[in-house]
Amino acid sequence: MTAWAKDDLKSRLSAAAAEAPMDAEWRRFDESGAMEDDGALALPLTISVTSVASLEGNAHVLSSRGATKRFFEFSFDLEWEAKAVVQPGEEGAEKAKTYQGKLAYVDVASAANLEPSLTFKKRHLVSEKRLRVAADALKSAVATAIHAFSQEFDTKGI
């Protein structure tokens, strides 16, 4: 059961993606008043999982006295990539950056109460606030994927 569960969960997590809406009020200046070099961050942002790393854990289906019990517990890291939605040729398209980071999930046993840790591959002091909005959208997409996995897992027999 664990092999199937890992494959299914990894497939669902790999497809997780989200979009953060445009933020016309987004500040593009750091504390010193210098302008942030990626003004495209005010545009809608797409964020998606680029890889599922270190998926560890197990899943079990047990039957005892006519009752079937299903449980799983997994830990995994999700590498992600975020970028502004900019059309080719649009102003700022050539300057739009790609941002990367990781969401680390520990002891996932359901889609409820998920508290992943968020890290950025490279520190972006000014843009981190905006990127956290995109990461929150991705966390919701991941919770939806885990919930779908959990529902599918609940249909599995011994």
Image (spheres, helix red, strand yellow):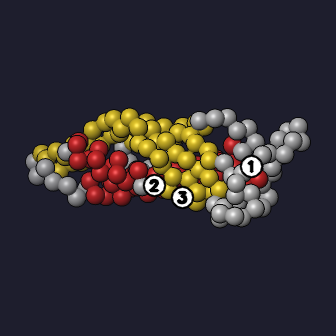
Query: Residue at point 66% right, 48% down?
Result: 97
Circle 3 is placed at which residue position? 18
108 or 77, nearer to the observer: 77
87 or 69, nearer to the observer: 87
Label 3 crowd bin: few (<14), some (14–19), many (20+), radius 10 Å: many
Report helix, strand or loop for mark 3: strand
8 to the left or right of 131: left
Residue 38 circle label: 1
Q: CA distance from mark 2 to mark 3?
A: 7 Å
Residue 116 in view of the camera: no
Circle 2 is placed at which residue position? 16
Label 1 crowd bin: few (<14), some (14–19), many (20+), radius 10 Å: some
Residue 75, above or below 66:
above
Label 2 crowd bin: few (<14), some (14–19), many (20+), radius 10 Å: many
Report helix, strand or loop for mark 2: loop
Outermost residue, left side: 65
